[in-house]
Amino acid sequence: METNLWEKYKDTKEVFDFCDGYKEFLSNNKTERECAKFAVDLAEKNGFQNLQTLMEQKKTLKAGDKVYAVNMDKSVALFVIGTMPFESGLNIVGAHIDSPRLDLKAKPLYESQGFCMLDTHYYGGIKKYQWTASPLALHGVIVKKDGSKIDFVVGENDDQVVGISDLLPHLEKGPEKKDEINGEDLNIIAGNMAKVDAKDNKFKAFILDILKEKGIEEDDFFSAEIEAVPAGKARDFGLDKSMIIGYGQDDRVCAYTGLMAIMKVENPTHTVCNLLVDKEEIGSVGATGMHSKWFENTVAEVMNLCGEYSELALRRALNRSNMLSSDVTAAVDPNFTAAFNPATDAHFAKGISFNKFTGAYGKSGANDANPEFIATLRQKLDEENVAFQATEMGKVDQGGGGTIAYIMAKFGMNVIDAGVPVLNMHARWEITSKVDVYEAYRAYVAFYNIKIK
Ligand SMILES: [Zn+2]
Protein backbone atom coordinates (compact mmCIF):
# COMPACT_ATOMS: atom_id res chain seq x y z
CA MET A 1 0.00 0.00 0.00
CA GLU A 2 2.83 2.46 0.67
CA THR A 3 4.69 3.65 -2.40
CA ASN A 4 6.61 6.79 -3.18
CA LEU A 5 4.18 8.68 -5.35
CA TRP A 6 6.79 10.46 -7.41
CA GLU A 7 7.54 7.00 -8.81
CA LYS A 8 3.86 6.55 -9.65
CA TYR A 9 3.42 9.99 -11.22
CA LYS A 10 6.37 10.11 -13.58
CA ASP A 11 4.27 12.41 -15.75
CA THR A 12 3.48 15.09 -13.21
CA LYS A 13 1.18 17.23 -15.36
CA GLU A 14 -2.15 16.09 -13.88
CA VAL A 15 -0.72 16.51 -10.35
CA PHE A 16 0.72 19.97 -11.01
CA ASP A 17 -2.39 21.18 -12.87
CA PHE A 18 -4.66 20.12 -10.01
CA CYS A 19 -2.36 21.81 -7.49
CA ASP A 20 -2.32 25.08 -9.47
CA GLY A 21 -6.08 25.28 -8.84
CA TYR A 22 -5.51 24.44 -5.19
CA LYS A 23 -2.86 27.15 -4.78
CA GLU A 24 -5.22 29.72 -6.27
CA PHE A 25 -7.95 28.60 -3.85
CA LEU A 26 -5.57 28.97 -0.89
CA SER A 27 -4.40 32.41 -2.03
CA ASN A 28 -7.92 33.77 -2.47
CA ASN A 29 -9.71 32.15 0.50
CA LYS A 30 -8.25 32.82 3.93
CA THR A 31 -11.33 32.85 6.16
CA GLU A 32 -14.17 30.37 6.70
CA ARG A 33 -16.58 32.86 5.08
CA GLU A 34 -14.40 33.15 1.98
CA CYS A 35 -14.09 29.34 1.75
CA ALA A 36 -17.87 28.89 2.19
CA LYS A 37 -18.51 31.41 -0.59
CA PHE A 38 -16.03 29.61 -2.85
CA ALA A 39 -17.84 26.31 -2.23
CA VAL A 40 -21.26 27.83 -2.96
CA ASP A 41 -20.08 29.52 -6.18
CA LEU A 42 -18.48 26.28 -7.39
CA ALA A 43 -21.56 24.24 -6.41
CA GLU A 44 -23.92 26.55 -8.31
CA LYS A 45 -21.72 26.37 -11.40
CA ASN A 46 -21.93 22.56 -11.16
CA GLY A 47 -25.68 22.26 -10.92
CA PHE A 48 -26.20 22.19 -7.14
CA GLN A 49 -29.40 23.89 -5.99
CA ASN A 50 -29.85 25.94 -2.83
CA LEU A 51 -31.77 23.92 -0.21
CA GLN A 52 -33.35 27.04 1.26
CA THR A 53 -34.74 28.11 -2.11
CA LEU A 54 -36.11 24.62 -2.80
CA MET A 55 -37.82 24.61 0.61
CA GLU A 56 -39.38 28.04 0.02
CA GLN A 57 -40.62 27.00 -3.40
CA LYS A 58 -41.90 23.68 -2.00
CA LYS A 59 -39.88 21.74 -4.59
CA THR A 60 -38.93 18.09 -4.26
CA LEU A 61 -35.66 16.21 -4.78
CA LYS A 62 -34.97 12.88 -6.48
CA ALA A 63 -32.04 10.55 -7.14
CA GLY A 64 -29.26 12.27 -9.07
CA ASP A 65 -30.18 15.77 -7.84
CA LYS A 66 -27.54 18.01 -6.30
CA VAL A 67 -28.27 20.33 -3.41
CA TYR A 68 -26.32 22.51 -0.97
CA ALA A 69 -27.04 24.28 2.31
CA VAL A 70 -25.17 27.12 4.01
CA ASN A 71 -25.02 27.83 7.72
CA MET A 72 -24.46 31.49 8.66
CA ASP A 73 -22.07 31.92 5.72
CA LYS A 74 -19.48 29.84 7.61
CA SER A 75 -20.24 26.19 6.98
CA VAL A 76 -21.59 24.35 3.95
CA ALA A 77 -23.04 20.90 3.25
CA LEU A 78 -23.33 19.59 -0.30
CA PHE A 79 -25.33 16.50 -1.26
CA VAL A 80 -25.75 14.36 -4.37
CA ILE A 81 -28.87 12.24 -3.90
CA GLY A 82 -28.37 8.49 -4.35
CA THR A 83 -30.65 5.85 -5.80
CA MET A 84 -30.77 3.93 -2.49
CA PRO A 85 -32.99 5.31 0.28
CA PHE A 86 -31.37 7.56 2.91
CA GLU A 87 -31.95 4.82 5.48
CA SER A 88 -29.15 2.83 3.86
CA GLY A 89 -26.68 5.53 4.96
CA LEU A 90 -24.65 8.33 3.39
CA ASN A 91 -21.02 8.56 2.35
CA ILE A 92 -19.71 11.72 3.99
CA VAL A 93 -16.39 13.54 3.62
CA GLY A 94 -16.09 16.28 6.24
CA ALA A 95 -13.37 18.90 6.60
CA HIS A 96 -13.04 22.18 8.47
CA ILE A 97 -12.52 25.57 6.88
CA ASP A 98 -11.41 27.62 9.90
CA SER A 99 -7.67 28.04 10.56
CA PRO A 100 -5.52 29.49 13.35
CA ARG A 101 -5.23 33.27 13.19
CA LEU A 102 -5.58 36.49 15.17
CA ASP A 103 -9.08 37.93 15.53
CA LEU A 104 -9.58 41.66 16.12
CA LYS A 105 -11.24 42.32 19.46
CA ALA A 106 -14.67 43.96 19.60
CA LYS A 107 -12.97 47.21 20.70
CA PRO A 108 -9.68 46.89 18.83
CA LEU A 109 -8.55 50.50 18.36
CA TYR A 110 -6.26 52.28 20.79
CA GLU A 111 -3.12 54.35 20.60
CA SER A 112 0.29 54.00 22.20
CA GLN A 113 3.62 55.83 21.74
CA GLY A 114 2.46 57.64 18.62
CA PHE A 115 0.96 54.59 16.95
CA CYS A 116 -2.62 53.58 16.30
CA MET A 117 -2.93 49.94 17.32
CA LEU A 118 -5.39 47.08 16.81
CA ASP A 119 -5.86 44.72 19.75
CA THR A 120 -6.32 41.01 18.91
CA HIS A 121 -7.34 37.74 20.54
CA TYR A 122 -5.72 34.72 18.92
CA TYR A 123 -7.85 31.86 17.57
CA GLY A 124 -6.70 28.24 17.72
CA GLY A 125 -3.33 26.73 18.55
CA ILE A 126 -0.48 29.01 17.48
CA LYS A 127 3.15 29.62 18.40
CA LYS A 128 2.70 33.29 19.19
CA TYR A 129 6.21 34.45 18.24
CA GLN A 130 5.61 33.35 14.64
CA TRP A 131 3.04 36.09 14.20
CA THR A 132 5.42 39.00 14.86
CA ALA A 133 7.68 40.84 12.43
CA SER A 134 5.96 39.67 9.30
CA PRO A 135 3.32 41.03 6.94
CA LEU A 136 -0.30 40.40 7.90
CA ALA A 137 -3.52 40.98 5.99
CA LEU A 138 -6.93 41.74 7.46
CA HIS A 139 -9.90 39.79 6.10
CA GLY A 140 -13.46 39.92 7.30
CA VAL A 141 -16.85 41.44 7.41
CA ILE A 142 -18.42 44.35 9.26
CA VAL A 143 -22.17 44.34 9.77
CA LYS A 144 -23.77 47.75 10.18
CA LYS A 145 -26.74 48.29 12.50
CA ASP A 146 -29.08 48.33 9.49
CA GLY A 147 -27.91 44.81 8.56
CA SER A 148 -25.80 45.86 5.58
CA LYS A 149 -22.41 44.15 5.30
CA ILE A 150 -19.08 45.65 4.40
CA ASP A 151 -16.46 43.20 3.13
CA PHE A 152 -13.13 44.27 4.53
CA VAL A 153 -9.87 43.01 2.99
CA VAL A 154 -6.57 44.85 3.36
CA GLY A 155 -3.17 43.40 2.56
CA GLU A 156 -3.59 41.08 -0.41
CA ASN A 157 -3.62 42.75 -3.80
CA ASP A 158 -3.07 46.33 -2.70
CA ASP A 159 0.66 46.34 -1.85
CA GLN A 160 -0.18 47.38 1.69
CA VAL A 161 0.05 45.22 4.81
CA VAL A 162 -0.08 45.52 8.60
CA GLY A 163 1.83 43.59 11.24
CA ILE A 164 3.10 43.14 14.79
CA SER A 165 6.50 44.47 15.87
CA ASP A 166 9.10 42.31 17.64
CA LEU A 167 11.91 43.18 20.04
CA LEU A 168 15.49 43.55 18.84
CA PRO A 169 17.55 40.54 20.04
CA HIS A 170 20.11 42.90 21.64
CA LEU A 171 17.42 44.13 24.01
CA GLU A 172 16.21 40.70 25.01
CA LYS A 173 17.56 40.17 28.50
CA GLY A 174 18.44 36.67 29.67
CA PRO A 175 17.58 33.37 28.06
CA GLU A 176 13.91 34.24 27.50
CA LYS A 177 12.40 32.39 24.61
CA LYS A 178 10.61 34.31 21.93
CA ASP A 179 7.61 32.01 22.08
CA GLU A 180 6.89 33.35 25.52
CA ILE A 181 5.15 36.32 23.95
CA ASN A 182 1.90 36.95 25.76
CA GLY A 183 -1.37 36.70 23.89
CA GLU A 184 -2.26 40.15 25.13
CA ASP A 185 0.87 41.55 23.46
CA LEU A 186 -0.16 40.50 19.94
CA ASN A 187 -1.14 44.01 18.91
CA ILE A 188 -1.17 45.07 15.29
CA ILE A 189 0.31 48.42 14.27
CA ALA A 190 -2.31 50.18 12.16
CA GLY A 191 -0.72 53.57 11.62
CA ASN A 192 1.65 56.32 12.70
CA MET A 193 0.13 59.52 11.24
CA ALA A 194 -1.68 62.06 13.37
CA LYS A 195 -4.86 63.98 12.66
CA VAL A 196 -3.58 67.49 13.32
CA ASP A 197 -6.88 69.12 14.27
CA ALA A 198 -8.05 66.30 16.58
CA LYS A 199 -8.25 67.29 20.25
CA ASP A 200 -6.85 64.03 21.61
CA ASN A 201 -6.10 60.48 20.38
CA LYS A 202 -4.73 62.04 17.18
CA PHE A 203 -3.24 58.79 15.87
CA LYS A 204 -6.41 56.80 16.39
CA ALA A 205 -8.41 59.67 14.87
CA PHE A 206 -6.32 59.48 11.69
CA ILE A 207 -7.10 55.77 11.22
CA LEU A 208 -10.77 56.32 12.09
CA ASP A 209 -10.97 58.84 9.23
CA ILE A 210 -9.59 56.21 6.82
CA LEU A 211 -12.14 53.68 8.09
CA LYS A 212 -14.93 56.27 7.78
CA GLU A 213 -14.20 56.47 4.04
CA LYS A 214 -15.09 52.75 3.89
CA GLY A 215 -18.30 53.41 5.85
CA ILE A 216 -16.90 52.00 9.12
CA GLU A 217 -17.37 53.65 12.54
CA GLU A 218 -15.42 52.63 15.64
CA ASP A 219 -18.46 50.98 17.29
CA ASP A 220 -19.02 48.82 14.20
CA PHE A 221 -16.15 46.51 15.26
CA PHE A 222 -18.52 45.07 17.87
CA SER A 223 -20.60 43.55 15.05
CA ALA A 224 -17.65 42.44 12.94
CA GLU A 225 -15.44 39.44 12.27
CA ILE A 226 -12.02 40.66 11.18
CA GLU A 227 -9.19 38.13 11.04
CA ALA A 228 -5.48 38.95 10.79
CA VAL A 229 -3.89 36.31 8.56
CA PRO A 230 -0.50 35.97 6.81
CA ALA A 231 -0.41 38.28 3.79
CA GLY A 232 0.50 36.87 0.39
CA LYS A 233 -0.11 33.99 -1.93
CA ALA A 234 0.43 30.25 -1.67
CA ARG A 235 3.52 29.27 -3.65
CA ASP A 236 5.47 26.33 -5.00
CA PHE A 237 7.96 25.10 -2.42
CA GLY A 238 11.34 23.48 -3.07
CA LEU A 239 13.80 23.78 -5.94
CA ASP A 240 11.86 20.94 -7.58
CA LYS A 241 8.48 22.68 -6.94
CA SER A 242 7.24 19.37 -5.54
CA MET A 243 5.50 21.02 -2.58
CA ILE A 244 3.16 23.89 -1.75
CA ILE A 245 3.60 26.47 0.98
CA GLY A 246 0.50 28.39 2.00
CA TYR A 247 -1.57 29.65 4.90
CA GLY A 248 -4.42 27.55 6.29
CA GLN A 249 -3.68 24.21 4.61
CA ASP A 250 -5.01 22.72 7.87
CA ASP A 251 -7.61 21.98 6.84
CA ARG A 252 -8.34 23.70 3.56
CA VAL A 253 -6.31 21.08 1.72
CA CYS A 254 -8.91 18.48 2.71
CA ALA A 255 -11.76 20.96 2.19
CA TYR A 256 -10.64 21.70 -1.37
CA THR A 257 -9.94 18.09 -2.36
CA GLY A 258 -13.21 16.80 -0.86
CA LEU A 259 -15.13 19.59 -2.57
CA MET A 260 -13.50 19.02 -5.96
CA ALA A 261 -14.19 15.30 -5.58
CA ILE A 262 -17.95 15.73 -5.00
CA MET A 263 -18.12 17.81 -8.19
CA LYS A 264 -17.19 14.59 -10.01
CA VAL A 265 -20.01 12.52 -8.48
CA GLU A 266 -22.94 11.69 -10.79
CA ASN A 267 -25.88 9.41 -9.91
CA PRO A 268 -24.37 7.70 -6.87
CA THR A 269 -25.89 4.61 -5.24
CA HIS A 270 -25.78 6.01 -1.70
CA THR A 271 -26.34 9.72 -1.14
CA VAL A 272 -22.99 11.47 -0.80
CA CYS A 273 -22.21 14.53 1.26
CA ASN A 274 -19.32 16.94 1.49
CA LEU A 275 -19.32 18.84 4.75
CA LEU A 276 -17.24 21.97 5.36
CA VAL A 277 -17.47 23.20 8.94
CA ASP A 278 -16.22 26.05 11.08
CA LYS A 279 -14.75 26.27 14.62
CA GLU A 280 -12.79 22.97 14.62
CA GLU A 281 -9.69 24.78 15.82
CA ILE A 282 -11.44 25.89 19.01
CA GLY A 283 -13.28 22.65 19.80
CA SER A 284 -16.04 22.52 17.13
CA VAL A 285 -18.28 24.65 19.34
CA GLY A 286 -20.87 27.27 18.39
CA ALA A 287 -23.70 27.24 15.87
CA THR A 288 -21.30 26.75 12.93
CA GLY A 289 -19.12 24.08 14.57
CA MET A 290 -19.60 20.31 14.27
CA HIS A 291 -21.20 20.04 17.72
CA SER A 292 -24.13 22.12 16.44
CA LYS A 293 -27.36 20.35 15.40
CA TRP A 294 -27.19 22.09 12.04
CA PHE A 295 -25.89 19.10 10.08
CA GLU A 296 -28.51 16.75 11.52
CA ASN A 297 -31.25 19.30 10.81
CA THR A 298 -29.99 19.76 7.26
CA VAL A 299 -30.01 16.00 6.53
CA ALA A 300 -33.60 15.95 7.88
CA GLU A 301 -34.60 18.76 5.50
CA VAL A 302 -32.97 17.06 2.49
CA MET A 303 -34.71 13.77 3.37
CA ASN A 304 -37.98 15.67 3.68
CA LEU A 305 -37.66 17.07 0.14
CA CYS A 306 -36.99 13.50 -1.03
CA GLY A 307 -40.19 12.37 0.69
CA GLU A 308 -38.20 10.13 3.03
CA TYR A 309 -38.23 12.00 6.32
CA SER A 310 -39.25 10.46 9.58
CA GLU A 311 -37.45 10.69 12.90
CA LEU A 312 -36.59 7.00 12.69
CA ALA A 313 -35.42 7.19 9.07
CA LEU A 314 -33.13 10.11 10.00
CA ARG A 315 -31.61 8.17 12.92
CA ARG A 316 -31.05 5.15 10.66
CA ALA A 317 -29.53 7.26 7.89
CA LEU A 318 -26.97 8.80 10.24
CA ASN A 319 -26.33 5.55 12.08
CA ARG A 320 -25.59 3.64 8.87
CA SER A 321 -23.39 6.30 7.30
CA ASN A 322 -19.70 6.08 6.53
CA MET A 323 -17.50 9.08 7.05
CA LEU A 324 -14.00 10.25 6.31
CA SER A 325 -13.14 12.91 8.84
CA SER A 326 -10.84 14.58 6.36
CA ASP A 327 -8.32 16.48 8.39
CA VAL A 328 -4.59 16.88 8.06
CA THR A 329 -1.94 15.05 10.06
CA ALA A 330 1.66 15.92 10.98
CA ALA A 331 4.27 14.60 8.54
CA VAL A 332 7.64 13.37 9.81
CA ASP A 333 9.83 16.50 9.83
CA PRO A 334 13.54 16.13 8.96
CA ASN A 335 14.31 19.00 11.35
CA PHE A 336 12.39 17.57 14.31
CA THR A 337 12.73 13.80 14.01
CA ALA A 338 12.78 13.40 17.81
CA ALA A 339 9.05 14.19 18.00
CA PHE A 340 8.15 11.39 15.60
CA ASN A 341 8.30 7.66 15.19
CA PRO A 342 9.26 7.50 11.50
CA ALA A 343 8.15 3.86 11.29
CA THR A 344 4.55 4.64 12.20
CA ASP A 345 4.04 8.33 11.33
CA ALA A 346 3.06 9.97 8.04
CA HIS A 347 5.56 10.83 5.33
CA PHE A 348 5.37 13.15 2.35
CA ALA A 349 4.68 11.58 -1.05
CA LYS A 350 3.12 8.41 0.30
CA GLY A 351 -0.49 9.40 -0.25
CA ILE A 352 -3.49 10.11 1.92
CA SER A 353 -2.89 9.35 5.57
CA PHE A 354 -5.36 7.33 7.67
CA ASN A 355 -5.20 7.75 11.43
CA LYS A 356 -7.16 4.86 12.92
CA PHE A 357 -7.13 6.90 16.10
CA THR A 358 -5.88 10.32 17.17
CA GLY A 359 -6.11 11.54 20.76
CA ALA A 360 -3.25 11.76 23.23
CA TYR A 361 -1.81 10.01 26.29
CA GLY A 362 -3.31 6.56 25.90
CA LYS A 363 -5.61 7.43 22.94
CA SER A 364 -7.59 9.74 25.20
CA GLY A 365 -10.25 11.58 23.24
CA ALA A 366 -9.74 9.39 20.16
CA ASN A 367 -12.25 8.09 17.69
CA ASP A 368 -10.87 4.60 17.20
CA ALA A 369 -12.11 3.42 13.80
CA ASN A 370 -13.49 -0.09 13.34
CA PRO A 371 -11.32 -2.61 11.47
CA GLU A 372 -14.37 -3.85 9.55
CA PHE A 373 -14.81 -0.35 8.11
CA ILE A 374 -11.08 0.03 7.42
CA ALA A 375 -11.07 -3.28 5.53
CA THR A 376 -13.79 -1.95 3.19
CA LEU A 377 -11.74 1.20 2.61
CA ARG A 378 -8.57 -0.76 1.86
CA GLN A 379 -10.43 -2.86 -0.66
CA LYS A 380 -11.87 0.15 -2.48
CA LEU A 381 -8.66 2.20 -2.50
CA ASP A 382 -6.61 -0.73 -3.80
CA GLU A 383 -9.23 -1.32 -6.47
CA GLU A 384 -8.93 2.32 -7.59
CA ASN A 385 -5.12 2.29 -7.30
CA VAL A 386 -5.12 5.06 -4.66
CA ALA A 387 -1.98 5.25 -2.50
CA PHE A 388 -2.52 5.58 1.24
CA GLN A 389 -0.58 5.22 4.49
CA ALA A 390 -1.70 3.93 7.88
CA THR A 391 -0.29 6.38 10.41
CA GLU A 392 -0.26 7.94 13.85
CA MET A 393 0.53 11.54 14.72
CA GLY A 394 3.85 11.84 16.54
CA LYS A 395 5.44 9.63 19.18
CA VAL A 396 3.28 8.02 21.87
CA ASP A 397 2.96 10.48 24.78
CA GLN A 398 4.46 13.27 22.66
CA GLY A 399 1.11 15.01 22.40
CA GLY A 400 -1.72 14.60 19.94
CA GLY A 401 -4.77 16.22 18.55
CA GLY A 402 -8.43 15.92 17.76
CA THR A 403 -10.69 16.36 14.76
CA ILE A 404 -14.44 16.27 14.12
CA ALA A 405 -14.35 12.43 13.93
CA TYR A 406 -15.55 11.69 17.47
CA ILE A 407 -18.48 14.09 17.10
CA MET A 408 -19.84 12.34 14.01
CA ALA A 409 -19.18 8.96 15.64
CA LYS A 410 -21.84 9.91 18.22
CA PHE A 411 -24.47 9.11 15.57
CA GLY A 412 -23.10 5.56 15.55
CA MET A 413 -21.65 5.87 12.07
CA ASN A 414 -18.29 4.54 10.92
CA VAL A 415 -15.69 7.32 10.97
CA ILE A 416 -11.97 7.42 10.31
CA ASP A 417 -9.54 10.33 10.08
CA ALA A 418 -8.15 10.63 6.60
CA GLY A 419 -6.14 13.58 5.32
CA VAL A 420 -3.03 15.07 3.85
CA PRO A 421 0.28 15.05 5.77
CA VAL A 422 1.52 18.57 6.56
CA LEU A 423 4.85 20.07 7.67
CA ASN A 424 4.72 23.02 10.11
CA MET A 425 1.06 22.37 10.97
CA HIS A 426 -0.46 25.44 12.61
CA ALA A 427 2.45 27.65 11.55
CA ARG A 428 1.62 30.74 9.53
CA TRP A 429 2.81 28.97 6.39
CA GLU A 430 2.19 25.25 6.15
CA ILE A 431 3.73 22.84 3.63
CA THR A 432 2.18 19.92 1.74
CA SER A 433 3.38 17.59 -1.01
CA LYS A 434 1.61 18.01 -4.35
CA VAL A 435 1.28 14.27 -4.90
CA ASP A 436 -0.41 13.83 -1.51
CA VAL A 437 -2.88 16.61 -2.31
CA TYR A 438 -3.77 14.95 -5.59
CA GLU A 439 -3.95 11.47 -4.07
CA ALA A 440 -6.31 12.76 -1.35
CA TYR A 441 -8.60 14.07 -4.09
CA ARG A 442 -8.52 10.64 -5.78
CA ALA A 443 -9.19 8.92 -2.46
CA TYR A 444 -12.27 11.09 -1.83
CA VAL A 445 -13.61 10.39 -5.33
CA ALA A 446 -13.23 6.65 -4.64
CA PHE A 447 -14.82 6.94 -1.18
CA TYR A 448 -17.94 8.75 -2.40
CA ASN A 449 -18.67 5.69 -4.52
CA ILE A 450 -18.05 3.09 -1.85
CA LYS A 451 -20.81 0.56 -1.06
CA ILE A 452 -22.03 0.69 2.53
CA LYS A 453 -22.18 -2.76 4.06
ZN1 LIG B 1 -7.40 20.48 11.31
Image (cartoon, rainbow, N blue to C red):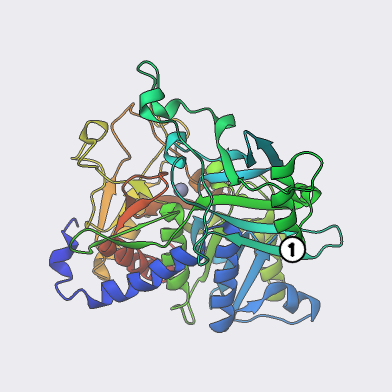
The image position of residue 309, as x and y in percent, is: 71, 67
State the residue lying farthest toward the front: 196
Viewer-proximal residue among 108 and 391: 108
The image position of residue 132, as x and y in percent, is: 46, 40
Q: Residue at x 44, y 72 (%)?
A: 260
Viewer-proximal residue among 16 and 52: 16
The image quarter in which residue 241 lies: bottom left
- Residue 131 horizontal side relative to residue 439, left or right: right
The image quarter in which residue 188 lies: top right
275, above or below 404, in the image: below
57, above or below 358, in the image: below
Mark 1 sits near ligand 1, with its Cβ under 8 Å away: no
The image position of residue 319, as x and y in percent, is: 56, 54
- Disc 1 target residue: 213
The image quarter in which residue 56 lies: bottom right
Q: Amino acid at mark 1?
A: Glu
Quarter of the figure that contains the N terminus = bottom left
Q: Residue at x 58, y 57 (%)?
A: 32
Viewer-proximal residue among 121 and 413: 121
Viewer-proximal residue among 16 and 157: 157
Q: Residue at x 39, y 73 (%)?
A: 21
- Residue 370 horizontal side relative to residue 17, left or right: right
Q: Secondary structure at mark 1?
A: helix
108, above or below 98, in the image: above
State the residue lying farthest toward the right: 146
Quarter of the figure that contains the C terminus = bottom left
Say if residue 89 shows up in the picture.
Answer: no
